[in-house]
Image (cartoon, rainbow, N blue to C red):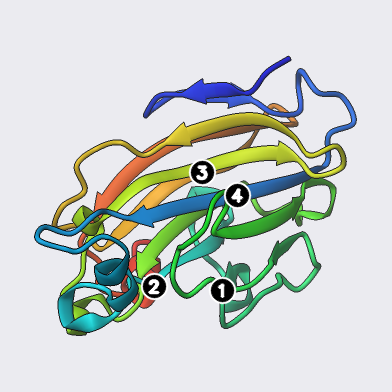
Amino acid sequence: MGSINLQKGQKIDLTKGNPGLTKLLIGLGWDEAPRAGGKGFLSGLLGGSGGSPIDCDASVIMLSANDKLTQKAHLVYFGNLKSPEGSIQHTGDNLTGTGEGDDEQILVDLSRIPAEIQKVVFVVNIYDCQKRKQDFGLISNAFIRVANSATNQELCRFSLTDNYAGKTALICAEVYRYNNEWKFAAIGEGTTDASLGELVRRY
């Protein structure tokens, strides 16, 4: 069975149709959009506004009932690469978003997610966006995908194709419990939160 391309707002069963699926690889990717008046490779190398490349950071917010983040350790990001029980593991920060395929990867072991966690939210924000005057209008080809990490088979992919100009953070998608199974929801909501700290305050 091939990968399913999701539209914004769509939901898909992860475990129901895949008995025994416990380990997921969540891949997130993005490219810098070509800049106006740029000379291709060189301008990409030097970056745009202020000469800084755009550093997008993927993070995971683990929520208990009522969509609340109840402990700091349940925020997994470049400064805390692993949740306390090891169910969520961030493989590390990519500073530029160059190259093919995933820019950042997060490993999720559904069987180890604590019972009180109902939802796992995947977000991306632009590091230091205010100082560098950067937003997601400068980013193209953003996506989040889910693969079975045991087989590397891609289960679904969601391309974030909305116009996110002026937005500095993206709530990409979530994996959540439903009747003892796990589902994936494509969210694709842009926000103007200037930092991960601001974004997390929503929860």
Image point (76%, 28%), residue name = 15
Query: Mark 2 sits on what residue?
Result: 55
Identify the amino acid type marked 4. Answer: Gly
Whether residues under marks 1 and 3 lie with C-beta atoms below 8 angstroms apart, the answer is no
Looking at the image, residue 74 sits to the left or right of residue 140; the answer is right
Residue type highlighted by circle 2: Asp
Work out whether mark 2 precedes mark 4 in sequence or the reverse, and give the earlier one. 4
Task: Identify the amino acid type marked 1.
Answer: Asp
Q: State left or right for residue 71 relative to residue 6.
A: right
Q: Tags 1 and 2 in contact by the CB under 8 Å rule?
A: yes
Mark positioned earlier in the residue sequence (1 or 3): 1
Would you name the residue on which mark 3 appears? 144
Where disc 1 sits, the SS reads loop
**Vertical placement of 183 versus 118: above or below?**
above
Q: Earlier in the sequence, mark 4 or mark 1?
A: 4
Give whichever of 66, 19 is nearer the camera.
19
